[in-house]
Amino acid sequence: MKDATPMTITAEQFANMTLEQAAEGVRTGAFAPAELLDASIARIERFEPAVNAVVTRDDEAAKKQAAAAAASPDAVLRGAPVGLKDNIMTRGLRTTCGSRMLDNFVPPYDAAVVERLRAAGAVIHAKTNMDEFAMGATGETSFFGATRNPWNPALVPGGSSSGSAALVAYGGVPAALGSDTGGSIRQPAAFCGIVGLKPTYGRVSRHGVGALASSLDQVGPLARNARDAALLMDVIAGRDRRDSTSAPQADTAAPCLPGIEDGVKGVRVGIDPSLTEREGFTPAMAEAFKRGVELAKDAGAIVTEVTLPLIDYLVAAYYIINVCEASANMARFDGIRYGERVGDGDLWEVYAETRGACLGDEVKRRIMMGSYALSKGYYDAYYLRAARVRRLFAGEMAKLFGQVDAVLMPVSPAPPRRIGTKAGVLENYLGDIFTIPASLAGLPAASYPVGIFDGMPAGVQAMGAAFSENLLCRIARAAEKSVSPAGAPWTKATPEEAK
Amino acid sequence: MSGKYKTTIGMEVHVELMTKTKMFCSCLNAPQDVPPNSATCPVCLGLPGALAAINKEAVRLGLRAALALNCKVNEVIWFERKNYMYPDLVKGYQVSQYEQPLGEWGHLTITGDDGNEKKVVIRRLHLEEDTAKLTHIDGAALVDANRSSTPLMEIVTEACLDSAREAEEYVRKLRAILVYNGISRCRIQRGEMRVEANVSIAPHGSKTLGVRTEIKNQAGFHHMRSAIEYEEKRHAEVIESGGTLVQETRGWDDANQRTFAQRSKENAHDYRYFPEPDLPSARIDPSWVEAEKTRMPATYEEYIAQLRESGLADADIDALTRNDALGLLRVAAETDPSATVLLAKRLAKDVFALVNSTGVRLDESKLAPEMLRDAVALQEKGTINADGFRQVLAHLFSNGGDAAAAAKALDLVTVQDDNAVRAAIAKVLKESEKMVAEYKAGKTATRNAIFGKVMKELQRKGDPKAVGALLDEMLG
């Protein structure tokens, strides 16, 4: 029965509430969606603009959503607020993709995942910061400034879903959506001590998601625990005819939340020890990976050694495909029909000045590289060859998943850097070495926290066969039962306490 | 071209497909009389996050065209991104086909310059999307995205045409076939068919082709022919005078009867083609191809032969082909092929009379095949008479609609009540005793005059057959 006066939720209580608990509380009448929203706003206002996870908020529209959510009690999220990475189109709510180019852009339509969230009763009030057009792995390329890691504000939260990861990590929302092209959900999730899931390519519709690399992009959940990630995954997954790359299995694959407590006894997990022996792999990361493997063993998984094929070629193949597709996807940003426009001269001046002023260095770099790699005489040597490597790798991985059910891998060779320290372009790209394989093969992968190492959380990554997201959630859930969340940012009142 | 040089021409034709919706989104395809930028959506506006999805009907029409043009149909097709930036290209790339077009190596038969049958080889036929429309005004350019992503089919011949005359016959035949098969309306004035001729000359016996120029944007086939002939002469003059021909695009200036340079032909323009990642390759099921083959009518040539065999006069056939009316005829006769000759005659006579009197082309009129079919059927049934038919037809030609409804609305339905007819006849017979007497005395021609009076009495709404029968009965 609903209380006459729903209790107020403090910001701290809210920060420690899971998505499931938030929805359940509304269901039982302990509180109303309006209370959840107020608490979310209160929490966000404590950490912003210091953390800089949020680009746009619309509290007024959110209040209306909260009231509507209260009126339809069957929607599974029941008015819980969910954060959205700012490359996901929201009707009537500014969507910038982290770029000056779209600083003034208000989409006239909702992305498919937003439609599903709204139908599930989610309240959307925060668009989160990101590397510009999802190009980056630290959050530092955003036009709106870098996002800080809530665990240590001097460090990067990872990227490109930097804002979504940080917002969830400090408890501004219980969960958020990000996008992952080569690791952009999994790596910031690991750097911020939360769970991040990249689905199988085609499991979640890309309709309404600003494209970076069309054959690689996927939208997925970031949450503080595996159950929440699974719950959110089940809401957003599903076939969409507007997206021709949306797979039929998106409607028939096993959902993630049911069976998540079943444990991993007897699950065959493969690890490739050579990965941790690579150059640049820091001791803290090695510790974390070791811990991840132990957790799997303790939970009853059968851990065996495997060899990941073609590892040395994957970063190159990935980045060629990425920059080529990105260069074409960026061509629509020309100052003509929407977005920012700079310059009053002739057509070519408008193009040059608009794109010159409104696109950042990393975006320009990739446009140039992609145009070059696709140009006459080079297409065969680069894009075509990269596509072949990719197909070869996907075939090998399919074989591998005949021998094991999941592969455990590190997430990142190094922990989060200090904000503002510049690494070389190539060094940055090589940092994606462990997240790229799942992207290239179109396979699902999840990162989940396994503890604190050198004062910062670190995670481990489980990769599975196509459409095995439910297994990955089970693996994450089994691990987290042994990992203490004490000391997490979301248990702290302020960013200072979170240090 | 006689004399020193041999002309070589290759044709590139773009045709807008007659689908209900656009090539890659659900917006209406070319809705009439709507404000600019109103038939648009995130996809055809190129908004971030919007994804193309293939219009299956467009593929079906493309497939039908490939079959009608004797092409080999590729079982697996995919689309590619053709990358360049221009304000009418909303995504900064056009989704088109490059490596694996829908159809290849087809042909169309014309009469060659030597009087013999000539197969014009169609190298490729592929699908793509149209750009938005640019209007230049006061030094500014306005973009209307209603046309953005309209389905286009591009048909490219080998460089195998030898003269402007052959080129003209090719495009006329191509249009006739496409209209006949219900693939496109091919109305040049609306940009539904756009023709480009690639022209070069070389000395007879030369193993290589000369520099080619591309002639674009002609307002009609006559212009295209004049432009090609002009180019042949111009090329020769440049060569003879020791000059160099530039590979470029030229337009036709009809007022001054000459071509003019538009822009350099981008022979080397690098479009950086790569397979469209948003559209996985599609397999065209052979059973779908077979089904389409079965659904297709007789070929264009076969249909004309059938019309000739069924007794239709050559003059009528000629009128029908000249006006690209065979498609309308075929569809109008679909439900009752035995009515073909009757419909053909009506088309050739009454419909074209309307074309002449109104100045409106048949393909610009509102007359749809079923309207002609229904109007003719009404007359055959006696529901309307010849006069009524002409009026109904004129109404449908200008307004469209339903034949029966038009007949009622215009008060043209014949008097169906026999008693009313008898009353009218009785009245006329009473008033025309002298004429009746003449008739009975053997002057049979008087009957027609009496008949005319009865029809007038019925306010021109008599069914001639019924009235005639009743009159004969009452005259005794």
Image (cartoon, rainbow, N blue to C red):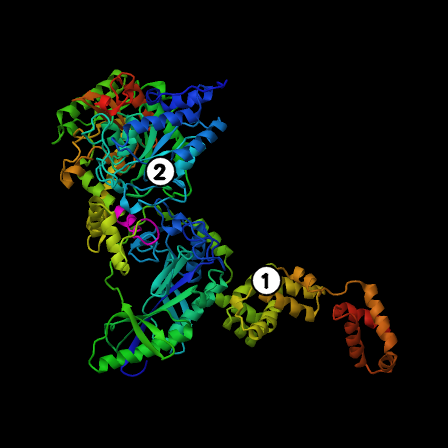
Nearer to me, B245 or B255 = B255
Q: Between tags 1 and 2, which lies in front?
A: 1
Q: Is A39 situated above or below B147?
A: above
* Residue A454 magenta-highlighted: no
Give SS at disc 2: loop
What is the chain identity of the residue bearing mark 2?
A
Q: Is residue A258 visible?
A: no
Task: Looking at the picture, tell me which residue is in the foreground, A138 or B183.
Answer: A138
Would residue A155 be found to the left or right of residue A395 on screen?
A: left
In this figure, what is the number of numbered marks? 2
Magenta range: A326-339
| Secondary structure mostly seen in the magenta stretch | loop
- List x then y, in percent, for residue B237: 26, 81
Does B356 appear above or below A435?
A: below
SS for dot 1: loop
How far from the left and from the top, in percent, is residue A453?
Answer: 18, 21
Instruction: Say whether mark 2 and mark 1 are on the same chain.
Output: no
State which quarter of the image contains the C terminus of chain A.
top left
In the rendered image, residue A333 lying in the magenta stretch gets the answer: yes
Between B421 and B328, the residue placed more toward the observer is: B421
Q: Is residue B210 visible in the rendered structure shown here?
A: yes
**Residue A328, relative to residue A157: is it above or below?**
below
The answer to whether A338 appears left or right of B370 in the picture is: left
Farthest residue to the left: give it: A279
Amino acid beneath label 1:
Gly
- What residue sits right under mark 1 in the picture? B400
> Around disc 1, counting alpha carbons within 10 Å, would you say few (fewer than 14), some (14 to 19), or many (20 or more)?
some
In the foreground, A17 or B356 = A17
Measured in 3D between alpha carbons, the distance from the residue under mark 1 to the one under mark 2, in whole angstroms, is 47 Å
Q: Looking at the rendered structure, which numbered label has been put on residue A202?
A: 2
